[in-house]
Image (spheres, rainbow, N blue to C red):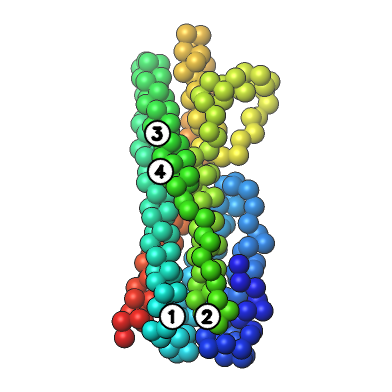
């Protein structure tokens, strides 16, 4: 990643004394890098919301006349093209995250509907649980493939093009945050039976710790499916109802944050295209 020293160096891209907006953007990048941690609900949500603030600074950064003049120079077309290619990858990652959540949410709503009709037959709940788990299996597979196909960013950076380097640093941080989001949505890659075995080995009166709310619902539904013959207790139903409501709320929050980020990514890309076309 580019260090702060890069933005203070004399170059053809930034003046010797950086603009306050550039300093602000640099500070935000450093702060967000240091705050990156494991993929938990709070960290993923915080990361996505922080990116929204970051891209507001990016918009100001791109409005600076000196930066617009730099980005429109023909001798750095190659570097600007790399930034534009990166913006497309980020849009794809953002869309993949939203698609994965949407698929999970649709099946989750079917489970909730079955829970509201639980006075009828347990069979309905079990069937919806199986459908949900099958969808989650497909989602996990798609996410795993998406993350595996992501090529590491080994693009060379040039200290004489600090404006481009700043944008690349923003994209790198954005990609890391979106990858954390996808990993969180995918949850554990263990098989359903492995998850159930973990639950069975724990005291039923103790809360099971999971790294993802998605994992929590997956584990409960796996347990209910495996315990079908012994019947589903009222406490299990209440627990499942509570967990699905938590997950639904979390999906809503994450989706809103991703939608906001998506709009910012589109706006930033449009601004870049407008700069180089003028």
Seen in the image, is 236 located left or right of residue 116? right
Q: Tell me whether circle 2 and circle 4 mark residues in contact (CB < 8 Å).
A: no
Mark found first going from the N terminus, 3 or 2: 3
Residue shown at 40% from the left, 16% from the top = 122
Q: CA distance from mark 2 to mark 4?
A: 37 Å
3 and 2 marks in contact (CB < 8 Å):
no
Query: Could you tell me residue 267's position as x and y percent?
Result: 37, 71
The mark nearer the N terminus, 4 or 1, is 1
Judge the density around disc 1: few (<14), some (14-19), many (≥20) Cα neighbours within 10 Å: few
User: Gap in Å between the C-alphas at discs 3 and 2?
Assistant: 43 Å
Disc ID at residue 138: 3
Residue 239: percent from the left, percent from the top?
Answer: 54, 28
CA gap between label 4 and label 3 equals 9 Å
Identify the residue position indicated by label 2 in the image.
Answer: 161
Which of the pair 187/123 is nearer the observer?
187
Q: Does residue 254 appear in this view?
A: no
Q: Who's the residue at 67% across and 79% down the image?
A: 5
Is residue 154 in view from this perspective?
A: yes
Disc 4 target residue: 100
SS for tag 2? Answer: loop
Whole-number angstrom distance, CA of label 4 to CA of label 1: 37 Å
Q: Which one is closest to the eye, mark 1 or mark 3? A: 1
Quadrant hosting residue 21: bottom right
At mark 4, the secondary structure is helix
Q: Nearer the viewer, mark 2 or mark 4?
A: 2
**x and y percent of residue 178 in the render?**
49, 54
Query: Relative to 32, does residue 109 appear above or below in the rendering?
Result: above
Residue under label 1, please give it: 76
């Amino acid at each position: 990643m580019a260090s702060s020293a890069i933005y203070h160096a004399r170059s053809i891209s930034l003046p010797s004394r950086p603009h306050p907006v550039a300093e602000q953007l640099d500070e935000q990048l450093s702060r967000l890098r240091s705050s990156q941690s494991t993929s938990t609900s709070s960290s993923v949500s915080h990361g996505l919301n922080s990116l929204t603030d970051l891209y507001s600074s990016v918009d100001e950064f791109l409005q600076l006349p000196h930066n617009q003049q730099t980005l429109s120079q023909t001798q750095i077309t190659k570097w600007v093209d790399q930034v534009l290619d990166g913006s497309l990858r980020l849009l794809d990652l953002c869309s993949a995250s939203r698609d994965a959540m949407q698929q999970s949410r649709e099946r989750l709503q079917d489970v909730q509907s079955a829970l509201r009709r639980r006075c009828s037959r347990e069979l309905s709940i079990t069937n919806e649980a199986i459908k949900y788990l099958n969808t989650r299996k497909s989602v996990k597979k798609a996410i795993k493939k998406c993350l595996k196909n992501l090529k590491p960013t080994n693009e060379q950076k040039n200290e004489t093009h600090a404006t481009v380097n700043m944008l690349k640093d923003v994209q790198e941080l954005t990609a890391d945050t979106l990858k954390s989001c996808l990993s969180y949505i995918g949850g554990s890659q263990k098989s359903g039976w492995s998850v159930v075995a973990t639950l069975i080995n724990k005291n039923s009166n103790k809360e099971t710790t999971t790294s993802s709310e998605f994992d929590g619902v997956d584990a409960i539904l796996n347990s209910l499916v495996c315990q079908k013959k012994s019947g589903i207790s009222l406490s299990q139903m209440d627990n499942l109802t509570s967990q699905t409501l938590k997950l639904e709320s979390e999906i809503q929050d994450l989706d809103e944050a991703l939608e906001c980020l998506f709009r910012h990514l589109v706006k930033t890309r449009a601004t870049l295209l407008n700069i180089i076309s003028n």
